[in-house]
Amino acid sequence: MNNTKHSFLTLAALIWSICLWSAGINYDGSSLSYNNDFTRTEVGTAYKSVMTEISGFACSRRTQGYIWAHGDENTGSDKKIIAISPDGTLKMTLNISGDPGRDDWEDIATGRYDGKDYVFIGAFGDNDLAYNNQYYIYYFDEPEITSGTKSASVKYIRFGYPDGKAHNTETLMYDNVEQMFYIVDKVKDGVCTLYKLPFKTTYGTSIQTLTAVCPLGNGSKFNYVTGGDISPNGKWMAIKNKKYTLLWERLPGESLSTTAARRPQQIAAYEEEAQGEAIAWLDSSTFYTTSDQKKDVPIYEYVRDIDPNEQYTTGINSVSSNVNQPHVVKKIINGTLYIIVDGVTYTVLGQRKQ
């Protein structure tokens, strides 16, 4: 490539980055439209007798019908996550070892990489801004959920922020399409920023630097972000604080970085949850939330009412990219077309088949 062409492409990339960055702050919460497609139902109670202050939810990808949860109280040698059913019934406890000793776990996610299901834990809370470059994502192969107690030894990715400063963070998301972590810092009076980092198992112990994607927007609906998740097909990103849940819809073939720079919608059915931190997508139409409090609190299920005229192109197969995609099989079962992705069966609109 000649120098002139290289310089032109570099300049174009810089301009595009600036445009994306600016796009994320050209609106505020007062101008958001409402998404009225979701119905909210109380389905259970968080299992407080085993784990208080639940601050992270992630739906299991290996064992259908269960939610991984963790609490803020994971300190010292007593570190664990639990698997519960959506009604709050405890199914399994998973004791965690092998971590570098970083407490203050704030979020959990699940995802697929190189043909394996993984669980990811964000050990990156920093209320006092005292842990610069001491932020971690733990990861391990997702075990089958059975009754009783199991153990898991974690590996970890250590990271820092591009400005070299300390950040308080409570949101970890994983995108199956790009095989990418998306992280949002928690800013009380200011603009929260979305960052990304590719998932690799070869980082070792070196410090990885996040890439800033864009600010999320101005106003109270965008600050103090406490949780988020990306649907398993990559179509939806939901980010919340205790008062609001915002929804971004990814278009076919689109990078999530581009999606995030657009104005989101506010989910009308969401009602304020005191200390509401946990959110987890089951499939492309259903997610769960609960609150981080030292008492029994409800678990809520939000189900999207799907337009019968919605086309197949908005279902499980809708997002394409240049990375390896999960293996997809189309199959007719009892006269109905389903999409099977890595052994999990979905309707053509992306709903997980029970």
Image (spheres, grey):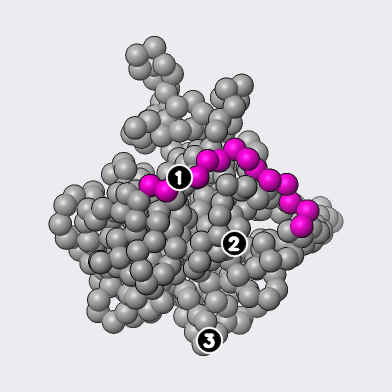
Helix, strand, or loop for circle 3?
Answer: loop
At a point 25% along the width and 66% down the height, the residue shown is: 50
Q: Is residue 220 visible?
A: yes
> Which residue carries the number 3 mark?
128
Q: Nearer the viewer, residue 182 or 263?
A: 263
Identify the amino acid type marked 1: Thr
Magenta span covers which residues? 30-43
> Which residue carries the number 1 mark?
41
Q: As drawn, is 27 to the left or to the right of 292?
A: right
- Crowding around mark 3 (Cα neighbors within 10 Å: few <14, some 14 to 19, many 20+) is few
Number of numbered markers: 3
Decide whether the magenta segment is chiefly helix, strand or loop. Answer: strand
Q: Is residue 106 above or below residue 17?
A: below
Q: CA distance from mark 2 to mark 3?
A: 23 Å
Q: As drawn, is 73 to the left or to the right of 316?
A: left
Instruction: Tell me, for residue 243, which label it has, or none.
Output: 2
Please tell me which of labels 2 and 3 falls first in the chain: 3
